[in-house]
Image (cartoon, rainbow, N blue to C red):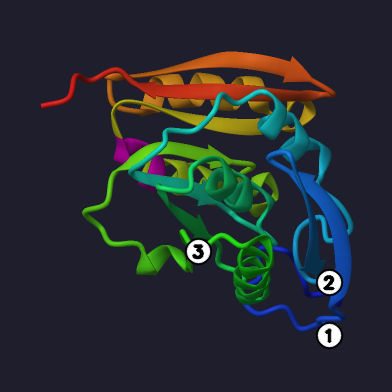
Amino acid sequence: MSSGDHYFSASPESAARLRPLHVRLAGRDLELTTASGVFSPDHVDVGTQVLLAHTPTPPPGGHLLDIGCGWGPVAISLALASPHATVWAVDVNERALDLTRRNAAAAGVDNVNVVTPEDVPAELRFMTIWSNPPIRVGKNVLHNLLQHWLPRLEPGSDAWLVIARNLGSDSLQRWLGATLPTTFATTRAATSKGFRVLRVRNRAEAA
């Protein structure tokens, strides 16, 4: 990356330098593409590995959300596991969105909508949300991000977030508990390799 580049930059300045990446997602061996200027371009990062290993099978239908999709490992895992659902892969990084589109096509999944946050219809509600959220954007931006998306969980549905323990997972858990609507409950679902998986459940009953 250039000195001004971050994986949460909308338009990375560095040259893309596309390169192949062999990964295994949802039990499938895949040949995908990554590039500089996105989060963890050389492998599925440890946090995402922990998330994928400690999250139950996603709902078979409805709308599913990946916040901060990067080059697509979470969104593609959701799409492979739930081929009849609609997966929304959201990122502010244009290069990440392009890579996720490429990689969804390479994985043979056609149920992924790869969009900026503004392009997700406001009325949509989600049967699950999976995310390795961009902690390094700063606390205020992260809090605004989670306050925007988590209340859009369907009643009776769960969000799953992976956060490094040394980057404030426990304080974030407390903040979520104090900030989200009273129907929401945040618990620690798993701890592995220095990461926590937080479960955020909307306990409201369906209408």
**Residue closest to the eye, 121 or 175:** 121
**Residue closest to the eye, 173 or 85:** 85
- Tell me which residue sits at (68%, 33%) in the image: 52
Residue at label 3?
A: 110
Point out the stretch of residues depicted in magenta: 148-153
Amino acid carrying label 1: it is: Ala
Q: Quadrant of residue 70?
A: bottom right
The kind of secondary structure element at disc 3 is: loop
- Tell me which residue sits at (54%, 30%) in the image: 160
Where the C terminus falls, by quadrant? top left
Q: Quadrant of residue 185?
A: top left
Q: Does residue 5 sit above or below 168 in this rendering?
A: below
Residue at label 1?
A: 15
Q: CA distance from mark 2 to mark 1?
A: 7 Å
- Cβ atoms under marks 3 and 1 closer than 8 Å: no
Residue at label 2?
A: 36
Q: CA distance from mark 3 to mark 1?
A: 28 Å
